[in-house]
Amino acid sequence: MAKFISAIMKITSNIFQVGGQALSHQSDAAVYLIKSGDEAALVDAGTGKGSEDLFSNIRETGTELEFIKYIFVTHCHYDHAGGINQIREITGSRVVAHALDAPYIESGDPEMTASSWYREDMDPSWVDIKIPENEKKFTIGSLEISFIHTPGHTPGSSVITLISDGLLILFGQDIHGPLNDLFRSDRQEYEKSLKFLLTLNADILCEGHFGIYKGRERVKDFIESFL
Ligand SMILES: [Zn+2]
Ligand SMILES: [Zn+2]
């Protein structure tokens, strides 16, 4: 049976959704591409089960795989981080994650990465840049990217923000949670992080499992619904 693959989604002139449930593999969280000139980055890596489709989607946006400078990993979960090694191998990109989640990406711990939920093994992956602080800036072409620690879902959960086409874009992959003792979620930290995200007044939210929210009011309503 032919596999259903939906079209790549162009979000702004710099941002595309290239992976996710309908784009690369049913278990993949959303994978977003950020590009500017001949530099690019990915937000999350999917499970690795749909990497071939992910690569062809990236190429379809006019992006060479070698342009990908970083893989920004929002947290250690299998659906976001399982595909790191395959992407790094072919792109030569550097993997960025918060220092509090990096140990689980590197060990492949089945509970902390939630791979046991998927009845899969997480491929342990080296993290090149472990961010110990609250916020770190990166550049992709002419874009400035902020990697910001927003703990709660997991200890090292983080978001990525940037301005593209004059709009503030927020990549909040697992803003919706869930919270679970198995992966050391923390309700208090989570609520604090959500309140911080509301102060950003983002114009577009790119979520990991719930799609793309456009407009400040819609973004705000989505975030508030978890408070
Ligand atoms: Zn998660
Ligand atoms: Zn997820």
Image (cartoon, helix red, strand yellow):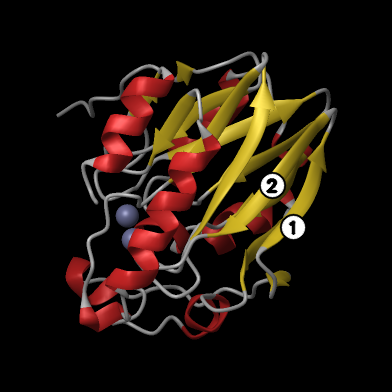
Q: Are marks 2 and 1 in contact (CB under 8 Å)?
A: yes
Query: Is 1 in front, or is 38?
Result: 38
Q: Looking at the rendering, in which quadrant would you find the N terminus?
A: top left
- Residue 46: tell me if it is visible: no
- Between marks 2 and 1, how big is the CA–CA gap? 6 Å
Q: In the displayed structure, would residue 111 be above or below residue 162?
A: below
Of marks 2 and 1, which one's residue comes earlier in the chain?
1
The residue shown at (66%, 61%) is 96
Query: Is 217 in front, or is 44?
Result: 217
The residue shown at (44%, 41%) is 198
> Tag on residue 146?
2
Under tag 1, what secondary structure? strand
Q: Residue 145 appears in which quarter of the rendering?
A: top right
Q: In the displayed structure, would residue 113 be above or below residue 171?
A: below
Q: Is mark 1 within 8 Å of ligand 1?
A: no
Left or right: where 119 falls relative to 134: left
Q: Which residue is mark 1?
A: 136
Give the amino acid at mark 1.
Answer: Lys
The residue shown at (71%, 50%) is 70
